[in-house]
Image: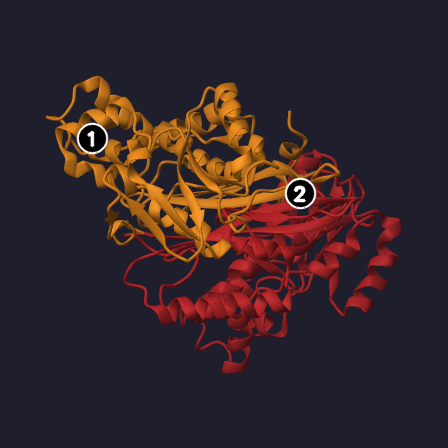
Chain colours: A orange, B red
Amino acid sequence: MYPGALELCDDAGLVSVPEGFDLVVTTDAIVSGVHFFPEDDPTALGQKLLRVNLSDLAAMGAKPFAYTLTIALPTSIGDSWVERLSIGLKCDQVEFRINLLGGDSVSTSGPIVLSATMFGLVSKGRFLRRSTAEQGDFIFVSGTIGDSALGLRAVRGELDSLADSRHLKALMSRYYLPDPRLELGQRLVGLAHAVIDLSDGLAGDLMHICTASQTGAVVELRCLPLSVAAKTVVEADPALLRIAWAGGDDYELLFTVSKSACAEIALLSDNLNLQLTPIGRICDGHDVKFFDWKGQLVAGLSGWVHY
Amino acid sequence: MYPGALELCDDAGLVSVPEGFDLVVTTDAIVSGVHFFPEDDPTALGQKLLRVNLSDLAAMGAKPFAYTLTIALPTSIGDSWVERLSIGLKCDQVEFRINLLGGDSVSTSGPIVLSATMFGLVSKGRFLRRSTAEQGDFIFVSGTIGDSALGLRAVRGELDSLADSRHLKALMSRYYLPDPRLELGQRLVGLAHAVIDLSDGLAGDLMHICTASQTGAVVELRCLPLSVAAKTVVEADPALLRIAWAGGDDYELLFTVSKSACAEIALLSDNLNLQLTPIGRICDGHDVKFFDWKGQLVAGLSGWVHY
């Protein structure tokens, strides 16, 4: 049993941080009707809550170890809903080797609010940041993007005519269960210059790096990695391409590395069995510019992103 | 500027825990319509949110240093409400020397939910707990109890005929702005056996200590310390006495010490200029028993407490 958990019956939880490590803390909340549907499976919700927080730790290069939980529930919520939420939390506690340190449960007259604060460890002074991109850096993205944004449309039944159920299921699964890139984040420590996780959408999140680093960036849209499922629906309806590019909630890592480190990134991709795709470069200026297949500037992609 | 705050623009905040210290973490949420009135002053709400969390740290003997914040706000909330909340938070950041480490702001279709996770430091292995009361210990309570519970009735206008406005104001102020006993908590390290902060009410919280410590307790009701304002309204309406005793939200510390430490507690009370009152003893068994002026057992006080 985790020592800190012994203190669950006390007023607060206890965290022992080993020498030579910094503690990284992140907090994210999800609200019914805003971030999820009231009818969503509570087991998956518990997992998603933890995973969006874990993704923030991945972007810092931290190894997660514990979390606290605050839930605001309407009185109409039954015990079985809470039980199923708890199963989702416990599944991912095992999956990601994290422990529940304590929390608070309150009642509300409004929609469900689930909030977690996640704790991770990183070697002292070695954490990854957004603000350290350098001109000339190559910009990489992990995995594929757009699956979650398209998955949300699939959940709403908007893509039923565009692809078979296997592809739609694949997209929905990425929407319900993001896969935080924890191992990648830890391996990028000392290798990447700047890192962020993709939650707001590619344009917005790359802009966060550029603003913090006082740089600009160019991105080749043809390089953006799409999954087979995403390609299938986008080919059936090309208007969905912008949603794939900019829809957000990917929980992939976007990172920049020097040219000399690119070979190491290729090795890392093999080691982790995870696609790591170069999509552009960091440059001077303060804009993020997107270029299409023909080398034409695509305007309005940043502006289009929902925040 | 606090180093961790530099990371506010990153995905997570950074906490450096000095060698020889443990990190103590607590989380508490408050919901509009449940824990506060929608028309309450947001400045005071910001302070109350921090203070109920600080009170948990006080009960662990920890020194607070930072917090994270999650707020779920309806879209109808205006900028000026948020600005006033922020003023309350900033006031107490200065008052208690704590720093905002990061947070999340989400929208909700329901009532306001404010949640904070508070971080404190305590010397390694020296934190105070609930589970270490010993038979024969004297039970002490800090300050006065009942003010907050009576203050809530005063806010509702239920006590208008019972006392003058000065007394009612004093009670209301205790309801709106609890005073976390941080210095007392830190001074109790190595001195008290078991500590808890009074949030659920005296009977319930003392029961928490007894359950965790596998002991019983007896309390002399005549010893319970009431403020002048509380005495005034209770004399005007004796039925309010039970509310004063058991209403909760006092955020005073309830602690147990050996007989030999009682003299030191008296000194501490002088040093801190804070009333520390012996109200009973820890004994065998597993019940909390309350005795009145005549030495008669008062039944139902525990059962009466709202949880």
- x, y percentage for residue A203? 34, 47
Q: Residues within 10 Å of mark 1 (few under 14, many from 20)?
A: many
Residue at point 27% right, 27% down?
A171
Which quarter of the rendering shows the N terminus of chain B? bottom right
Closest to the observer: B41 or B95?
Answer: B95
Residue marked by disc 1: A154
Residue B295: percent from left, percent from top: 69, 52
Location of residue B245 in the rendering, given as x and y in whole percent from the top left corner: 58, 57
Name the side, left or right, on which A29 lies relative to A22: left
Say the numbered circle drawn on residue B177. none
| The one of A81 and A282 positioned closer to us in this rendering | A282
A124 up-or-down from B228: above or below: above
Residue A201 makes an appearance in the image:
no
The CA distance from mark 2 to mark 1 is 41 Å
Q: Secondary structure at mark 1?
A: helix
Depth check, front residue: A148 or B267: A148
Q: Residue furthest front?
A: A295
Q: Toward which corner of the image does residue B187 lie, by quadrant? A: bottom right
Q: Determine whether B176 is above or below A45 in the image.
A: below
Judged left or right of residue A181, residue A23 is: right
What is the chain letter for disc 2?
Answer: A
